[in-house]
Image (cartoon, coloured by chain):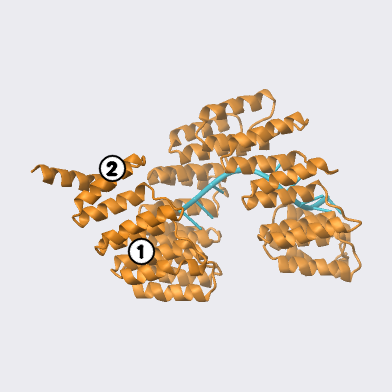
Amino acid sequence: MRPRPSVVRFNQILGQVAKLKHYSAVISLYNQMGVSRIGHDVYNLTIVINCYCHLNQMGFSLSVLGKFFKVGLEPNVITFNTLISGYLLENRAAEAAGIFNKMIAGDNCQPNVVTYGTLVKGFCMRGNNRAAIQLLRKMEEGVCKPDLVVYNTIIDSLCKDTLVDDALNLFSEMMCKGIAPNVITYTSLIHGVCKLGEWKEATRLLNEIVSKNIFPNVFTFSVLVDTLCKEGMVVEAEGVVEMMIQRDIDPNAVTYTSLVDGYCLRGEIGKAQNVFELMLSKGSMVNVVSYNTLINGYCKLKKIDEAMMLFLDMSHKGLVANTFTYNTLLDGFGKAGRIQDAQKLFSEMQACGQLPNVRTYSILLDGLCKNQQLSRAMQLFGEIEAKKLDINIVIYNILIEGLCIAGKIESARDLFCGLSSKGLRPDVRTYDIMINGLCIAGLTSEAEKFLIQMEEKGCPPDGCTYNTIIRGFIHNKQTSMAMVLIQTMVEKGFSADASTTELIVNLLSKDCL
DNA sequence: TTAGGGTTAG
């Protein structure tokens, strides 16, 4: 008989597997080995709670918490922090706050700097930088002072929102308090300035980091590679990769995937494929995101069969396609007019356990509407409503556009008027679609009313709106009104796009003849 | 021995 592992040894294994982020493996170990046989303690129960949190299974986390009380154990501050983090990951801020309040009200488990750090991250994740900074100020007044992690969390969030000046102010403030920045602080700042296209400032920060003997790492360089690629500067990005290799910093899946995306964005699919193959040659470097990126590149070029080959290839490699993968391919089939293939893949996705989200449905609706299958689109819309999914304005925009293009302006108008009863507000795109539909139906004066209404409702028209309505007036041979609108558009700082320009040129040349 | 911070896809 094999000796029974002691609780210490068992916990060590559990800890190591958790560190590798193999959460399901930890849970199956916990269930298979029967902790009741080995012994529960605060450590192993907290690890299991954490794993359920990362798998977005808070229900199970709570049942493990119940186990504490059954066996007479007291959860500690780490257990509570883990639960707060789990709730925040599931976007359940009220429950997270509930635990925090219980900690404050209790005697033996007061919040520590990690508790506050977790809450700060929660605010940042919801885009609420203001609340995050308020909590930072509260910490400064209390016993539990903010540390580097708290500052880094907020600095990063500000940089992501391109509020780099605010981030730099916080950065100076932090240093005045004697908290030295690390490579994470600088990586966030570099990311922020790169997003603004301030390459000189990025170089200055890189020099500063080196002068402080802080070494830029794979994260720092990947940020540079990615932002250069997003700006279309793939050649420069390749140069950064070269620099990394010279400095003995190995580019990882993220670095190379950014390059793949950079080439895809420029339509250079061959070069994207080359980088992808380089990744494949490096063994286990390719992940689901890398496949999705290249699949997306092929779909954008309407090369859906090549995209499907990659999809099959990833399954053969044991990688599980996610909702993003299916959405990309569904969109590709829809844009290629292959609705039957899209329907087949949609069934396959559900059979594989990948849950369709609002985006999946919007892609399917768009495919149906753009392929003259309006009645099926309306039927699908009914199914989406029945599922009680969080229907957004994008879904309505697709349907309204489908109705307009099919000449059903009355139904489009009804749907538009019913938006507020659904708790939704039309956006610029909604107005543009309605204006275009009304112009197609020859109802230009009503289109003009929409143009005025959008301004009044706090949704000012943009360049696209003016182009749409100007084209509408020209098509309806109301040239004098078109000319007035062209002047207004120019005065507002917008310009005519290629297709509007062509129409204007035709109009003027006819006038001359 | 477990909890909070930085990089990739619509």
Q: Residue at x 28, y 68 (%)?
A: A407
Foreground: disc 1 or disc 2:
2
Quadrant for the N terminus of chain A in the image: bottom right
- Under mark 2, the amino acid is Gln
Q: Nearer the viewer, residue A30 or A493?
A: A493
Horizontal side of residue A80 vs A356, given as left or right: right
Mark sitting earlier along the chain (1/2): 1
B6 displayed left or right of A35: left
Does the residue at mark 1 contact the one at mark 2 (Cβ under 8 Å)?
Answer: no
Q: Is residue A452 left or right of residue A226?
A: left
Residue sitting at x 69%, y 52%? A122
Mark 1 Cα-neighbour bin, 10 Å: few <14, some 14–19, many ≥20: many
Rendering colour (chain B):
cyan
Q: Nearer the viewer, residue A89 or A401?
A: A401
Q: Residue at x 73, y 42 (%)?
A: A150
List the residue tagged with mark 2: A487
Number of callouts: 2
